[in-house]
Image (cartoon, rainbow, N blue to C red):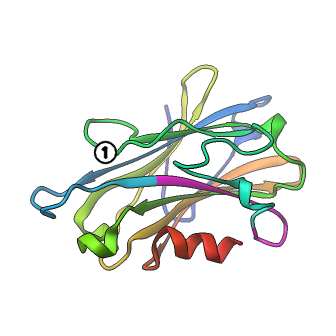
Amino acid sequence: MAIDLKKGGKINLQKEKPGINKITVGLGWDVNDGASPFPFDCDASVFILGENGKLLADEFFVFYNNLKSPDGAVVHNGDNRTGAGDGDDETINIELSKLNPQATQIVFAITIDKAEERKQDFGMIRNSFARVYNADTGEALCQYLLEEKFSDANALIIGRFYKSGSEWIFEAFDLAYSDGLGGLVEYYQ
């Protein structure tokens, strides 16, 4: 059974599942009924960072227009333009053994495409979550359901992996931004 994390909660992947190498992170959300006359298109993105907290290179920003990191370790499984249905809306596969050795963090974000133009924000969204799975077995390791509404925010950092020695820790947290995907990219460059 998956561990339910609260904001700030952590799980050490190697201690929970010794030898784990392939991980899937699923991100999901639901749009409130009648929230907007326009369709919502939320997007998952991944920032692979070095010790300085910045992207290793621009190509280490993985999203709907760059589905794979240059080392082949992080693969985005494609853009879900509606978020309809149960379960994960977008998934990212990570193979730890392939990660560039300079990578010390993997940050996960959800943003709303055309949020300003459509006057959409995360206050119109419910059930935003992140789940971490063993990619080989499908076993859920942990999950994090956001409890805040984040009105006026159109970009959320929903969690991260960070390296502690040779071990990878998943930390559940949320940081809200109002500058969209472009603002996050600028922050991490």
- Tell me which segment is drawn in magenta: 44-54
Residue 50 included in the magenta stretch of the image:
yes
Asked if residue 181 lies left or right of residue 134, the reply is left
Q: Position of residue 189 (x, y in %)?
A: 71, 72
Decide: is 47 above or below 167: below
Decide: is 42 above or below 90: below
Q: Position of residue 138 (x, y in %)?
A: 54, 24
**Label 1: how many residues lie within 10 Å, few (<14), some (14-19) or many (20+)?**
many
At horizontal 33% and vertical 69% (from top left) the residue drawn is: 115
Residue at the extreme left: 34
Decide: is 99 above or below 188: above
At horizontal 33% and vertical 54% (from top left) the residue drawn is: 41
> Secondary structure under badge 1?
loop
Can residue 149 be spotted in the picture? no
Residue topped by disc 1? 83
Asked if residue 93 lies left or right of residue 144, the reply is right
Kindly identify the amino acid type of the residue bearing the numbered disc 1: Gly
Viewer-nearest residue: 17 or 146: 146
Q: Position of residue 139 (x, y in %)?
A: 55, 26
